């Protein structure tokens, strides 16, 4: 047995630990221990306390016959270092993995959405001994070891045992706690040593550390039962959804030297102290989002990632909330507080690609385990291999875990267009493996959690992104209308004399709004990379920019589709967004910026309180044009209605105020203005309608009746019909 090679052996349990030996016609008990840090090792019987010294075989290996014992017994190991320090520990090789081959094979050979409950690191107790069981999928590895400070990062100490033909290695290590950082040391078929973070880890060391940490998911006690119960049987397409998109690391910072002009970050300094923690956000951000009347918050950069500048879209921890802001339990506390305040939480999720960080998924066991060959043509990242059942299970389990274990209310799936076309958006050839993966993902989630939101960030013209999978669609609940964002912002930047020629650009989205179920975003993508903040995308002088922005928001909130606004848009941010700095909160000392924030607050409240603006299961009956092509006045008008309510929306994209403007309406009766973006309290010019307006029996704009009203310059007016 002394010739047994541990360096390239995947079955150390066959050699290390306690074994019955029948050599020389004698039955005896033999114990073998690998501990290069020890000078002496003894075996201590847990029942009798008797100790048996082992022989030092060299190179850290100890071996010995345990007296006259002929049967196994519970034991601990007593170590003595070269310095004479003594310590005692249970032998990892005295324990076996309780999972059956059938349970392990389920992870790799069948559709299975709970692989994170099997793989990764699990704090547990075996035979009344507390510790952690580690399991990792590395089918091409010659050997896998768990390394950490607990074994001086020595891969000879805790070599894992391969479980049959599943490619899964496992080992229970007594005494490991949630504070025990670890990596996997992997010996490849070419005898190269790789040092990898755990793909299924739910907690990572704070950057620049590249180790993982065990996590006990059962400790946190949730307080959001009422919120979760309220979600049951809801139809999101007939509910108000207005989302505040947030990058946690740059929403707000703690006071510190980085605030001072000219401060330069020293080499190797990471300034984690500038970040608010998840628990800070649970107080400040929750209160803020609630104050502004948003229904949901969408969190960028929550999944663990090593580089701040990636904004969280180059993920190395698909099961872990980033440790920048605290622990997994701290993140649960943040979600819990949002829920207790009636606010849903959406997390950005990135199943299309991953970065080439050597400590993460790239060439994980010496082979391309998670990835295809080649790189993403635009981003230089690696694309997931959706041919593999194990890879699909990895991603499916990640999605389900965020929805179930962390209680998030939805996932915004990043870069769907890139997935559909294999990273080449100019290609006409779909990647059908990605298509099938997305259908499988949405089919599973819609069946298990019909009330959760699965949102596609998709710039393609793919048909049926939000159609049910049983009817040939991809099965998403909503799709970002990136075309709407591009067209509307392009129009709002157009000079007034030329807007008449660009009016169709503003109204084009009304032609295809029936094709899918949309979210109208004004997202982070439009305020970075020299694109300027939203306020500066607006045409005109300072007053006109604010008026245009209010009208732009008014169009978004009255146009069919759910709503999303990136942080800073609500205060009229004047700096282009950067992940390195917080928002321009100092702007709120100025009246126009404060009034814009109040406007967004009131607009959210109005949207939430008026079902005609959000009951959208059937847009064909919910929306009706009045006039959308008046190039002379640049006034567009339409009706939003339900059986109980009818709203007339009038938007003016010109500088002219109209005192006696005729609008066609479908019903006789009285009309009352219920919202006006030009109100003086929003820094408008005050062209409002204070009197009740009565319809007359005169056909205008193909409507049987009409009203005459004041239309504000660069403004929006909403009138409600009264019975």
Image (spheres, rainbow, N blue to C red):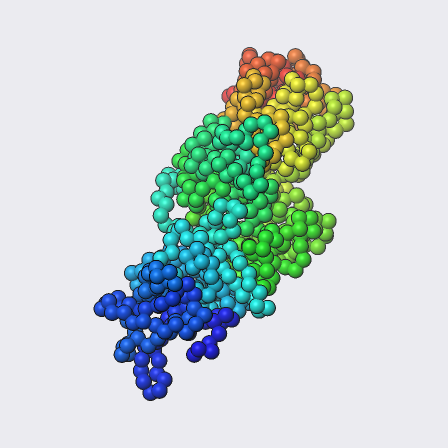
Classify 469 as above or below 2. Answer: above
Classify 57 as above or below 130. Answer: below
- On the rendered structure, is 560 left or right of 448? right
Residue furthest left as drawn: 48
Q: Position of residue 193 (x, y in %)?
A: 55, 63
Q: Position of residue 329 (x, y in %)?
A: 41, 44
Q: Nearer the viewer, residue 153 or 515?
A: 153
Quadrant, the N terminus: bottom left
Q: Nearer the viewer, residue 466 or 484?
A: 484
Residue furthest front as drawn: 83
Identified at 44% across, 53% down, the residue is: 181
Q: Position of residue 73 (x, y in %)?
A: 28, 71
Identified at 53% across, 40% down, the residue is: 270
Count of numbered badges drawn on the protein? 0
Q: Nearer the viewer, residue 295 or 204?
A: 204
Residue 664 visible in the shown view: no
Instruction: Tell me where residue 122 sits by quadrant.
Output: bottom left
Identified at 62% across, 48% down, the residue is: 416
Q: Position of residue 600 (x, y in %)?
A: 54, 25
Classify 432 as above or below 611. Answer: below
Residue 535 visible in the shown view: yes
Instruction: Tell me where residue 330 sits by quadrant.
Output: top left
Instruction: Tell me where residue 50 sits by quadrant.
Output: bottom left
Residue furthest bottom as drawn: 25
Identified at 47% across, 52% down, the residue is: 212
- On the rendered structure, is 56 left or right of 658? left
């Amino acid at each position: 047995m002394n010739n047994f090679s541990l360096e390239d052996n995947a079955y150390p349990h066959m050699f290390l630990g306690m074994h019955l030996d029948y050599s020389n016609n004698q039955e005896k008990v033999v114990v073998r221990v690998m501990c290069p840090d020890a000078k002496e090792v003894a075996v201590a019987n847990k029942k009798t306390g008797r100790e048996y010294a082992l022989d030092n075989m060299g190179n850290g290996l100890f071996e010995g016959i345990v007296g006259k014992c002929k049967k196994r017994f519970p034991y601990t190991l007593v170590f003595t270092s070269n310095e004479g320090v003594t310590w005692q520990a249970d032998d990892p090789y005295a324990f076996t993995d309780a999972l059956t081959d059938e349970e392990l094979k389920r992870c790799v050979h069948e559709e299975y959405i709970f692989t994170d409950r099997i793989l990764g690191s699990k704090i547990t107790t075996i035979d009344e001994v507390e510790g952690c069981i580690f399991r990792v999928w590395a089918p091409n590895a010659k050997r896998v070891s768990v390394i950490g400070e607990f074994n001086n990062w020595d891969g000879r100490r805790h070599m894992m045992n391969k479980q049959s033909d599943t490619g899964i290695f496992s080992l229970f290590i007594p005494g490991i706690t949630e504070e025990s950082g670890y990596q996997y040391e992997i010996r490849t078929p070419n005898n190269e040593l790789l040092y990898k973070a755990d793909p299924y880890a739910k907690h990572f060391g704070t950057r620049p550390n590249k180790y993982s940490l065990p996590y006990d998911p059962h400790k946190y006690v949730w307080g959001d039962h009422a919120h979760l119960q309220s979600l049951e049987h809801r139809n999101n397409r007939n509910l108000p959804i207005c989302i505040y998109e947030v990058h946690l690391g740059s929403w707000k910072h703690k006071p510190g030297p980085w605030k001072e002009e000219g401060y330069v970050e020293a080499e190797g300094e990471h300034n984690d102290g500038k970040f608010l923690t998840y628990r800070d956000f649970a107080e400040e951000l929750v209160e803020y989002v609630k104050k502004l009347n948003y229904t949901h918050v969408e969190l960028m950069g929550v999944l663990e990632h090593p580089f701040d500048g990636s904004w969280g879209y180059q993920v190395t921890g698909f099961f872990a909330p980033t440790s920048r802001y605290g622990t997994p339990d701290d993140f649960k506390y943040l979600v819990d507080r949002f829920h207790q305040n009636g606010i849903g939480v959406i997390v950005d999720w990135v199943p299309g690609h991953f970065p080439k960080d050597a400590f993460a998924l790239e060439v994980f066991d010496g082979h391309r385990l998670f990835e295809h060959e080649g790189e993403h043509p635009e981003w230089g990242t690696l694309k997931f291999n959706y041919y593999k059942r194990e890879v699909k299970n990895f991603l499916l389990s990640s999605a389900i875990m965020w929805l179930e274990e962390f209680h998030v209310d939805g996932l915004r799936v990043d870069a769907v267009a890139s997935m559909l076309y294999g990273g080449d958006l100019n290609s006409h050839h779909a990647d059908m493996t990605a298509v099938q993966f997305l259908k499988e993902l949405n089919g599973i989630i819609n069946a298990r959690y019909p009330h959760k939101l699965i949102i596609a960030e998709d710039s393609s013209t793919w048909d049926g992104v939000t159609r049910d999978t049983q009817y040939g669609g991809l099965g998403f609940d909503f799709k970002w209308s990136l075309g709407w964002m591009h067209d509307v912002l392009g129009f709002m930047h157009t000079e007034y004399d030329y807007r008449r020629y660009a009016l169709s650009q503003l109204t084009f989205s009304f032609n295809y709004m029936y094709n899918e179920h949309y979210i109208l975003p004004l997202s982070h993508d439009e305020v970075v990379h020299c694109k300027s903040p939203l306020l500066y995308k607006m045409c005109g002088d300072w007053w006109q920019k604010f008026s245009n922005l209010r009208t732009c928001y008014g169009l978004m909130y009255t146009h069919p589709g759910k709503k999303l606004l990136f942080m800073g848009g609500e205060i009229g941010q004047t700096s282009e967004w950067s992940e390195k700095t917080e928002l321009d909160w100092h702007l709120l000392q100025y009246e126009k910026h404060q009034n814009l924030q109040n406007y967004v607050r009131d607009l959210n409240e109005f949207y939430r309180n008026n079902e005609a603006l959000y009951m959208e299961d059937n847009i064909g009956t919910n929306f009706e044009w009045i006039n959308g092509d008046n190039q002379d006045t640049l006034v567009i008008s339409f009706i939003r209605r339900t059986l109980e309510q009818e709203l007339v929306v009038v938007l003016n994209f010109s500088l002219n105020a109209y005192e006696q403007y005729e609008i066609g309406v479908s019903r006789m009766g009285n009309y009352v203005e219920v919202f006006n973006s030009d109100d003086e309290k929003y820094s408008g010019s005050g062209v409002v309608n204070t009197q009740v307006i009565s319809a007359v029996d005169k056909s205008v704009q193909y409507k049987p009746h009409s009203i005459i009203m004041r239309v504000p310059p660069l403004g929006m007016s909403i009138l409600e019909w009264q019975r």
